[in-house]
Structure formats: structure tokens, C-alpha cells
Image (cartoon, rainbow, N blue to C red):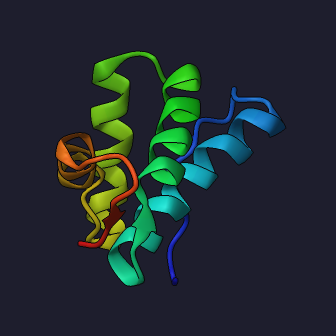
């Protein structure tokens, strides 16, 4: 990983950690695969910090631009997957 995650500087340390955990879950899904429940939990925490759809699109768009990993496509796949499934992009 030779890039920095998109973060907002007005987040608290704990909020920043939660958002970064979601970003690393996205990476994990692309690189190794991730359990659906683990991903959904990370996304739920992310949405507590970033409730705005516009802000989510902006941040996830920045993540995709720098990493090539689409959080949007990943979450679409995860939402349609059955509980207990492993998600691999």
C-alpha cells in the first residue's frame, strides 16, 4: 500500500480508526476475501461516522481512485450475499 486513506481531519481518533477499519476491510475483500458479517459490521461503523450518502460517495470515490478498490461494488455484492458467505472481489 503506497497511498493514504481519505480521511477528514475533524474526525476524532476513534472515528478515524473506525473508518480506516472499513477501508482495510475493502482491501481485504479484494486481496484475500472477507466474511460477510465482518464486512457488514465495518460498514455499519463507517456509516455511523459518515451518514451522508454524498460524503460516502466522495470518500469511497477517493479510495477507489487511489487504490483501485471499489467499496460501492463490494457493498453491492455483500448486500446480495447470504449470511455466512465469504466475499471475494
Q: Is residue 72 left or right of residue 55?
A: left
**Camera-nearest residue between 68 and 43:** 43
Q: Is residue 68 left or right of residue 36?
A: left
**Camera-nearest residue between 38 and 53:** 38
Quarter of the figure with the C terminus = bottom left
Residue sitting at 50 percent across and 74 percent down? 3
Residue sitting at 48 percent across and 48 percent down? 37
Q: Is residue 82 left or right of residue 56?
A: left
**Res 31 quadrant in image:** bottom left
Q: Position of residue 67 (x, y in %)?
A: 35, 71
Q: Is residue 34 above or below residue 23?
A: below
Q: Is residue 32 above or below residue 79?
A: below
Q: Is residue 27 left or right of residue 9?
A: left
Residue sitting at 30 percent across and 21 percent down? 53
Q: Position of residue 76 (x, y in %)?
A: 18, 44
Q: Position of residue 7 (x, y in %)?
A: 57, 44
Q: Is residue 53 above or below residue 79?
A: above
Residue sitting at 51 percent across and 83 percent down? 2
Amino acid at each position: 500500500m503506497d497511498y493514504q486513506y481519505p480521511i477528514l481531519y475533524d474526525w476524532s481518533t476513534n472515528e478515524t480508526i473506525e473508518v480506516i477499519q472499513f477501508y482495510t476491510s475493502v482491501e481485504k475483500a479484494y486481496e484475500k476475501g472477507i466474511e460477510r458479517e465482518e464486512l457488514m459490521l465495518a460498514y455499519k461503523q463507517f456509516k455511523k461516522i459518515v451518514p451522508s450518502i454524498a460524503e460516502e460517495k466522495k470518500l469511497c470515490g477517493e479510495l477507489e481512485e487511489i487504490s483501485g478498490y471499489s467499496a460501492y461494488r463490494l457493498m453491492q455484492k455483500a448486500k446480495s450475499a447470504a449470511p455466512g458467505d465469504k466475499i471475494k472481489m
